[in-house]
Image: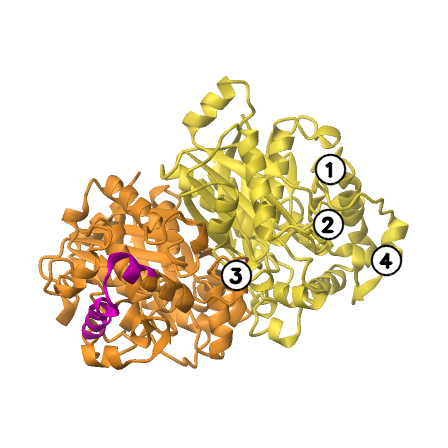
Chain colours: A yellow, B orange
Amino acid sequence: MNDVYIIGAGQIPVQKKSTESIRVLGARAVRNALADVELDSVPALYVGNMMSGILSNQQQLSAIVANEAGLKGIEALTVEAACGSGGGSAHVGCMAVASGMHDVVIAAGVERMTHADFQTTTCALATASDWETEGCNKETFVSLNARLMQEYMNRYGVDSSVFAPFAIVAHKNAWGNENALFHKEVTREVYENSKLINGPLRLYDASPICDGAAAIVLANADVARKRLAAGHPVVRIAASTVAIDAVGLDDRAELLVPQGVIDGCARAYAQASLGPEDIDIFELHDAYTIMSILSLEGAGFAAPGEGWRHGAEGRIELTGDLPIATMGGLKSRGHPVGATGIYQLAESWLQLSGRAGKNQVESARTALTQNVGGTAATVVTHILQRV
Amino acid sequence: MNDVYIIGAGQIPVQKKSTESIRVLGARAVRNALADVELDSVPALYVGNMMSGILSNQQQLSAIVANEAGLKGIEALTVEAACGSGGGSAHVGCMAVASGMHDVVIAAGVERMTHADFQTTTCALATASDWETEGCNKETFVSLNARLMQEYMNRYGVDSSVFAPFAIVAHKNAWGNENALFHKEVTREVYENSKLINGPLRLYDASPICDGAAAIVLANADVARKRLAAGHPVVRIAASTVAIDAVGLDDRAELLVPQGVIDGCARAYAQASLGPEDIDIFELHDAYTIMSILSLEGAGFAAPGEGWRHGAEGRIELTGDLPIATMGGLKSRGHPVGATGIYQLAESWLQLSGRAGKNQVESARTALTQNVGGTAATVVTHILQRV
C-alpha cells in the first residue's frame, strides 16, 4: 500500500451549548485545516459523524459541511461507526490517498449534541448499542460501562479506586490544551466524592456530552516530500485498521476481553512492523475509565486484569513510560462523538511534530491512536510515526 | 490506480412492510453475495444507509449487519450520502481494493422505511435536503422535484406529458425483474389519470417508499483473473467518482443545470478514457421523472432542454440506443434509499455478464450507473465494462 501522511490539522475548541449549527462547526475545523497547509481547497472531504440526522435533522452532512467551508464540487462522503466515526473517516481518507484516487484529502469529524435535551441525546447515543438487545431495553452507555466496571472489579478483586487515576490524569493534561472542554482540577478526593451515577460508575468515570469538530489533512508521498522540503512538519501513517466485535455485550464470549481492540492492534502492529514496545504515546478511547484499562490490556501493554496498574503506577502521565490522553482525552478534552477520532489524530500529529506545547511528550516518535464505536464494537486504530 | 472488479452480487426482493429488521435485510443480501462467489467471509464490509438511526434506532449498522451475516471481526464502516449512500459505499469499496488494503470486499446497501408511518418517513427523507433552508420550511423531495418539473416546463415550453415515458418504461422493465417491487402495467392513460401530488408532479412521477438490500463483491486483479480462469463472470470498474453540488436548490446558480451530474460524469469519463458515445446502458437515478431527464442532459446524452426527447423517441427502452432503468429503476424496482446505488451496480453487473434474463440489453459492453443524494447534491458515478 502506498504511504499516507498527515501534513496538517485544524481543531475548534470543544464546547457545550454551541450557538453555531453543526455545519458551521464542521466548516470551521475544515477551514482551520486548510489554513494550516495554506490550501484553498482539496479534492475530497470525508466527515465522521454519528447523530446529525437524529439531533440536527441533517443527513448528507459531508456535502453540507463542504459547501459551508467553500469547497465546491469536490468529492464528499459521510462515514459512520458510532463514536468511532471520526477514526472511520480517517481510515477512508487513508484509502483514498493510498489508492491514488486523490493526492490530498481532508478527514474531518463533527458532532453537535448539547442543543438537544439530555434525554434525547442519551437516547440518540444508545443507537450505538445493539438496539434490539440493549437500547430498546433502556440500556445506555453509562449502564453498559457500569456493568463492565463491576465485572472487572469482581473478576480481578480490585475496588473502584483503581479507576481514579484515569480521570485525574486526563483532567490534569487538559490544562495545557486550549481546545479542551474542561480546565478544572480533579483530585482523588474530588473523584471519590463525585456522584455515583450507576453502580460503581461515578460522574468522573464518564466523558462529557459536548460539541466539537476537527480535521486532518492527508497526503501522498509526493506532497509530503514537498512539504517537508519546505520546512513543514509531516507525520507518516504507518497503520490504519478497523476491526469489529459483536455489538451487544451479551453476544461476546468474554465480557472483559476487548476482541476488537486486540484484533485492531494486531493488524496495525503487523501493518507497521511494530509492536507495543515501540509505542511512545497511546491516545486511547477513554470514553469511560474502564475503557482505558481494557484498551491498555487489549493493545498488549498489560496482561488481563493488570491494566489498572498503569494508572496506579503513574505510567500514564505525560512523564510516564506510556502517556495516554495527552491533551485531555475523551474525558477532559471532551468526546464530541463523531469528531473524537480526528481530535486524537490531530493531537498525536502535534505531539509527533513537537508542537504540543506544555503537554509535549519528550522524544515521542510513535503514537498509537484508537477510536471506538459502541463498547469496543467498531475499533479504528492508527499508528503514526515522526518523519 | 489499481483495477477493481465486480466478481459477484446478491439482492433481496424490494418490498413494502418487511417484517424483518434492517439487520436481517442487510445480512440476507450480504450472504447472497457471498454465496454468489462461494466465499464464507471477506475482510471488509461497507454498508450504505441513510435512515437506520432515525427510523430503526440503530447506528453502527455496518457492524450490526456484518455480525448478523456471520462476518466476525472484520473491518466494517457505514457510508452515508442520503439517497446516494449505496453508491458511496461502492466508492469506498473501490478505494479499499485499489489501495491494496484488502483484496476482496463487499459493498452493500440497506434501507428499511415502511415500518414507520408515512409522515415520519417523509420527515426522515427531508433530512437529505438542506434542513436549514428547505426541510425546516416543510419542503419535501416531492415539493423540490415538483419545483424542478415546473421550472423545466416553463423554461423549455413542454407540457407534463413529456415525463410519462420515463414512468412507463420503468414499469415495463420491472416485469422481467423478480427483485422489483412493482409488477404492474402503467400505460400513458394510467399515468395521466394518476393523482396529482404537488403542482405538476403525479404519483407516477415519484419512486416508492420501500425496503430492500443489495450487495456486490469487489476484488483486485489477481482475484478477478482467477475467477475468470475458473469460468466465472467478471466486470471491470473503469471509473468511480463522487461530485457534490450545493445541497439547497436556492444555492445553485442554475436550477436546471445538474452540476454534480456534469462534474461526476466528466471525471468518470476521464478516468475511464471514455465518452457518452461509449455507453450502452445508463442506470440513472430516476427517483423522479424530472431527474431522469436532467441526468440525461447532465451526463452528455442530450443538450439542455432536450433530454425529454429520449423518452418521447423510445430511445430509453431496452431496445433503444440508450436503455435506462433496465430492471425497473428506482421508479419500479424501487428506491430503498441507501440500497439503491448497489441495486444499480448489481443490475448492471448482470447486464454486462449477459445474465439479465428477459431484460438483457443485447451486446451491452459498457454501463454508466449514477446514484444521487438529495436533488443531485451528492452524485456517485460508476462506469462498468465487460471483461
Residue A318 horizontal/vertical position (percent): 74, 35
Seen in the image, is A215 located left or right of residue B212? right
* First along the sequence among labels 2 and 4: 4
Q: Is residue A262 visible?
A: no
Magenta stretch contains residue B158: yes
Q: CA distance from mark 4 to mark 1?
A: 25 Å
Counting residues from the start of the chain, the first of labels 4 and 1 encountered is 1
The residues colored magenta run B151-172
- Give the CA separation, mark 3 to mark 2: 22 Å
Secondary structure beneath dot 4 equals loop
Q: Chain of mark 1?
A: A
Check disc 2 and give the amino acid type: Lys
The residue labelled by disc 3 is: B60
Q: Which residue is mark 1?
A: A178
The image shows residue B82, relative to residue A363, as above or below, that is: below
Element type at mark 3 = loop
Q: Position of residue A204 (x, y in %)?
A: 79, 55
The residue indicated by pointer 4 is: A194
Residue type highlighted by circle 3: Gln
Q: Earlier in the sequence, mark 2 or mark 1?
A: 1
Q: Residue at image x 31%, y 38%?
A: B1
Q: Quadrant of residue B112?
A: bottom left
Label 4 CA crowd tier, 10 Å (few <14, some 14–19, many 20+): some
Tell me which residue sits at (73%, 32%) in the image: A359
State whether discs 3 and 2 lie on one chain. no
3D distance between C-alphas at marks 3 and 4: 32 Å
Chain at numbered mark 3? B
- Badge 2: residue crowd in 10 Å (few <14, some 14–19, many ≥20): many
Callout 4: chain: A
Q: What residue did someone put label 2 on?
A: A331
Q: CA distance from mark 2 to mark 1?
A: 15 Å
